[in-house]
Image: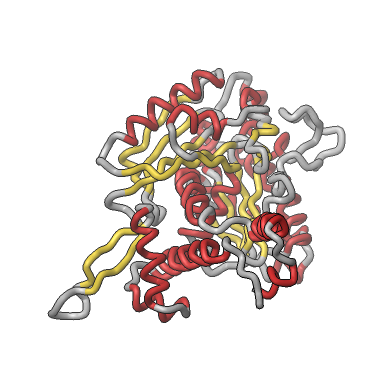
Amino acid sequence: MNNVSPFQPKLLSKINERLVLKMIQERGPSTRSEMSKYIGVTFPTVAKAVSSLLDSQLLEEIDDTSEGPGRPAKRLRLASENSQVIGITLGGDECTVVVGDLNGVVHEESMVRFSTPATYETLLKEFETSAKQLMLQGGKKTLGVGVSVPAVIDYREQVVVLSANMPFLNGKSIGRDIQAHLGQECVIVRDSHALSLSERLHGNAKEISNFAMLDLCAGIGLGLMVEGRFLTGDSGFAGEIGHNLIVPDGEMCVCGKRGCLESVASEWAIEKRMSGILGRPVRINEVLEMAQAGDQQAINELERMCEYLAIGLAHVVNILNPGTFFIYGRVFEACPELLNRLVEKTKALALEPSVSACEFSLASCSLQDGTVASVINYLTDSLVPNLDGYLSSLRQNDSQNGVSEEALVSN
């Protein structure tokens, strides 16, 4: 006779809830009958999962009048009328706070912008003031907060390890600190990782299992999706392309090393070079305006940036063989012809079979989309615990209760 673990029903319930959410994320509003058929579980099982998700305000019911007269069926959709999430974006120059729905829609009319403060304490106060203002609007329940950070993050410890362009964040648990200020669950994510999550959940990568995301802003980041799984690495450091050596004994980087990709191809690197050329401080927006107006010096610097970026992209293509390479950055939005130059240079450097199988495209999502996607991803994935960790705790508990591992496995 097999012993049954007391944890299994709870785990199975959470898995069913996750399957329901996944179906709605992928297929849109659905009835309970449609869920039962698509997921392959009984109607009562779906009804139980839906009931729990409604109680959690992750889902909401709407009438379905598309099937003609008679009593309308009830469809379930991701919450938008009664629930919301808050997305916070940190940038070297500007920070934003915005409201989003669980279906990934960002309400830009709600966006609060402010210049990035010089101190960590002031930053927290600004976020608290802005977020609380948005949480009180509309009468919706806030389910969580997502924060994108331009930094290397230790996801296990939820600590910023290195923010070369915002060093006052180093060593800080900004997610926990914001959570303490707001009284809301808060998840932090690296900005390039946030962009990748948004593209996967709500953008042009819904059907793509292998893709890379270049994030070009003040620094340079990389997001990676491999076989449908977001690659973070052992501690969360995966995708650190900006501080790879490109020019031996080259320019000093903000990280303290020489010759990093960021030192020759980031926004701050372009600003530094153009400032030296013109003999006065120049910001990236001015450089882009100059290039759009046909200024050859600005164009030359942006093309030089593409040549160095292509080296980094070629390495990624050769090593990881992504099916699609998404490119994010206001440089490419302002000067679309630069994308063609970047792709041309990358194709010339990468291994032909790999690069010929890779499509290059501008990212369809923004950093604000990414912060909202990060908290949605956290809310849905937290329904099902890490199975390795779950089984480990399960074995320990059942061992204490005299349940053999053979019985556990057979269950």
Give how far across and how far down residue 142 sits, in percent.
37, 42
Please state which of residues 79 and 197 is positioned toward the viewer in this rendering.
Answer: 79
Q: Quadrant of the N terminus?
A: bottom right
- At x 86%, y 33%, the residue is 249
Give how far across and how far down residue 229 sits, in percent.
63, 61
Q: Quadrant of the C terminus?
A: bottom right
Give how far across and how far down residue 133 sits, in percent.
33, 30
Residue 224 shows up from this direction: yes
Please state which of residues 51 and 133 is positioned toward the viewer in this rendering.
Answer: 51
Q: Which colouring convention does the figure follow?
A: secondary structure
Q: Using the image, determine if residue 6 lies above or below residue 98.
A: below
Give how far across and how far down residue 399 sits, in percent.
72, 59
Please state which of residues 371 and 389 is positioned toward the viewer in this rendering.
Answer: 389
- At x 60%, y 35%, the residue is 218
Report the residue that reaches farthest toward the left: 69
Classify residue 307 as left or right of residue 136: right
Please state which of residues 110 and 14 is positioned toward the viewer in this rendering.
Answer: 14
Report the residue that reaches farthest toward the right: 249
Q: How many marks?
A: 0
